[in-house]
Image (cartoon, helix red, strand yellow):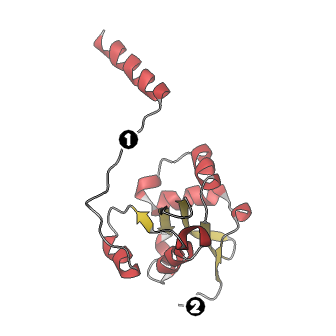
Amino acid sequence: MDSSHIQFCLDKSKIDLNQILQLLQVGAFWAKSRSREKMEIAITNSNPVVTVWDNERIIGFARATSDGVYRAGIWDVVIHPDYRGWGLGRKLVETVLTHPDVNRVERVYLTTTNQQSFYERIGFEPNSSTTMVLYNHSPLESIYQQELKVKAEK
């Protein structure tokens, strides 16, 4: 398969948010319901943000957050289903990992549901001993949920 026309881009100003949302719809079960507004905030607050292009079409996406010294996290790694198996996912993750905001930190975290073996081939290791999560609901959402519960009980 000739992939010489595939380009990797770190320039956030070139991101087409509509294409990112479409890509997440077809290639990322965990991100199907993301809103344009929240993805715009997430991208703004992430560095690096890497897009993969086939001419004018975004076919891959990943982003990271980092404190630049101790910890970084990689998020939303996705390659369009039609382009999987070309090695683009590996190159996408490696592009994130070699970025200066990520390559100097002590630990890089990544959450995955079904792709552990893919990430292990890149060098990630399972880390079940320290991973925890807090589902941080905004106060307004909590108040709204409480109001719905009260109405339902009446």
Decide if residue 128 is on the left or right side of residue 23: left
Give neighbour class at mark 2: few <14, some 14-19, many 20+ (Cα, 10 Å).
few
**Contact check, label 1 and label 2, Cβ < 8 Å:** no
Q: Residue at x 61, y 72 (%)?
A: 100
* Snapshot quadrant of residue 46: bottom right
Residue 151 location, x and y as percent? 36, 13
Q: Residue at x 74, y 61 (%)?
A: 13
* Snapshot quadrant of residue 20: bottom right
Residue nearest the viewer, comparing 7 with 93 = 93
Residue 4 location, x and y as percent? 63, 89
Q: Nearer the viewer, mark 1 or mark 2?
A: 1
Residue indicated by mark 1: 135
Residue nearest the viewer, comparing 15 with 70 = 70
Q: Please, which residue is most extreme toward the left here?
A: 129
Residue 139 location, x and y as percent? 47, 27
Q: Which mark is residue 2?
A: 2
Three-letter code for the amino acid on which mark 1 is drawn: Tyr
Q: Which mark is residue 120?
A: none
Q: Is residue 67 above or below residue 92?
A: above
Decide if residue 39 is on the left or right side of residue 145: right
Indicate the quadrant containing the C terminus: top left, top right, bottom left or bottom right. Answer: top left
What secondary structure is marked by label 2?
loop
